Every structure is written in structure tokens, then in C-alpha cells.
Amino acid sequence: MKRFSFIIILTVMFSFGAVSVMSCGGNKSSNATEQTGKEYTSAYVCPMHCEGSGSSEPGKCPVCGMEYVKNEDHKGDD
């Protein structure tokens, strides 16, 4: 009887662990290093990354009014 209880407990623990691992994988949308919007990919970006901001030339953010900063990660002719 003890062996049967041990097998049940082990099976439940394994199932819980498998479900926990599967539920945590695959969510890459929260990773800030992979942002693709204009506010992250333009030559000049707002320090606050306001939605819709970003320019190929220096200036001010139309949303918050902060001065654009040079985007060191810029790779294209945006």
C-alpha cells in the first residue's frame, strides 16, 4: 500500500511540474530588447519611448515634448 501511495504522489508531483514548466514558456512579448515599433527603431527616439514617436532627424517628441536622443541601436534608414 505504501508503494501505491508513493507512485500516486510522484505522479501528481510530476504532472504539476510539467504543467508549471509549460505554462511559463513562449511569452516573448514582454521582452523590451525585442521592441519593433517606430519609437524604438528610428534614428532618433524619445527617451520615454512614447507611442508613435521617433524620427530620422533630431527634434522633440510630439507626445511628451522631450528632446529626441540618438538611437545607438539604429541600423536602417528610418
Image (cartoon, helix red, strand yellow):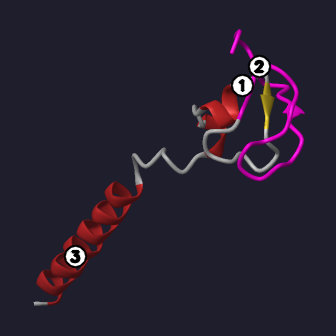
Q: In this view, does 52 lie to the left or right of 73?
A: left
Q: Where is residue 44 in the image (x, y as percent from the top left)?
A: 81, 28
For label 2, the residue is: 56
Query: Which span is picked out in magenta?
Result: 54-78
Q: What's the mark number on residue 42?
A: 1
Q: Is residue 59 left or right of residue 53?
A: right
What's under tag 3, amino acid-wise?
Val
Report the predominant secondary structure element of the magenta stretch. loop
Residue in front for this viewpoint, 78 or 9: 78
Quadrant in the picture for residue 55: top right
Q: For the point 68% across and 34% down, which residue is it? A: 40
Question: Badge 2, how many Cα within 10 Å: few under 14, some, many 20+?
Answer: some
Q: Is residue 55 left or right of residue 51?
A: right
Q: Position of residue 51 (x, y in %)?
A: 61, 45
Is 68 within the magenta? yes
Whole-angstrom CA distance, mark 2 to mark 3, is 57 Å
What's under tag 1, amino acid-wise?
Ser
For label 3, the residue is: 12
SS at badge 2: loop
Q: Where is residue 54 in the image (x, y as percent from the top left)?
A: 72, 32
Question: Badge 3, how many Cα within 10 Å: few under 14, some, many 20+?
Answer: few
Q: Is residue 2 left or right of residue 72?
A: left
Q: For the point 89% across and 41% down, which residue is it? A: 67
Q: Nearer the viewer, mark 2 or mark 3?
A: 2
Q: Earlier in the sequence, mark 2 or mark 3?
A: 3
What's under tag 2, amino acid-wise?
Ser
